[in-house]
Image (cartoon, grey):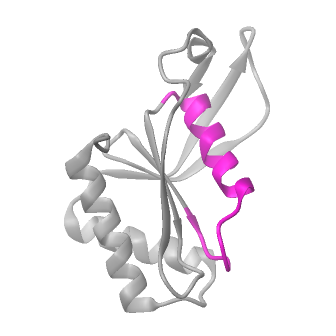
Amino acid sequence: MALLYEEESKQLLGLAMTLHRELGCGFKEKVYQDAFEVLLKEQGIPYIREHHVVLTYHGVELPHDFYYDFLCFGKIGIEIKAMQALDGVCESQLINYLHVSNHQLGLLLNFGAASLQYKWIPNQWHHRPTAQICGTR
């Protein structure tokens, strides 16, 4: 099965690998976010940091805030973690953001382990009628 947005996906994963190779593990999540932003800028990759996603339910905007760490190329949501190992909670967070935003692909990155951990998460709900209740801001 081919990866969605193959060229952009390879670029983003390459940046993450560079970052982990250069900084290693042990820093706080915010450090990796800041460093990842530096690499995005250096490579001229379009992104929005802390992209706000709004959930509207039955026509009412719910007062809950959802933020991708980064939305790259206007279509790939990225969540950055710095923990010993990824868990289901991290995956669920990104799955929910994809569902609410209706973006098709997410990348979960963990810089807290000795080796970079990553997981591509496709949006299983993309194009479902429930996606029409959601929006971004």
The relative height of residue 46 versus residue 20 in the rendered view (above or below) is above
Residue 127: x and y in percent read 47, 16
From the viewer's perspective, is residue 102 above or below residue 65?
Answer: above
Q: Position of residue 38 (x, y in %)?
A: 35, 74
Pick whichever, 120 or 101, lies toward us.
120
Which residue is found at the position 68% from the left and 48% from the top? 93
Residue 105 image point, x, y percent: 43, 41
Confirm whether residue 137 shows in the render.
Answer: no
Predominant secondary structure in magenta? helix
Give above or below for 108 relative to 76: below
Residue 114 sits in quarter: bottom right
Q: Name which residue lies at 39% across and 68% down.
A: 37
Q: Magenta span has 18?
A: no
Residue at the (61%, 29%) spot, across then down = 100
Q: Is residue 58 visible?
A: yes
Asked if the stretch drawn in magenta spans residue 96, the answer is yes
Counting every numbered tag in the picture gives: 0
Q: Is residue 5 left or right of residue 121?
A: left
Give the residue furthest to the right: 63
Quadrant holding the N terminus: top left
In the rendered image, which quarter contains the C terminus?
top right
Image location of residue 131, percent across then percent down: 57, 17
Q: Which residues are magenta?
A: 80-102
Q: Is residue 22 above or below residue 102?
A: below
Relative horizontal placement of residue 20, taking residue 10 as reference (left or right): right
Q: Residue furthest front?
A: 1
Locate residue 90: give its quadrant: bottom right
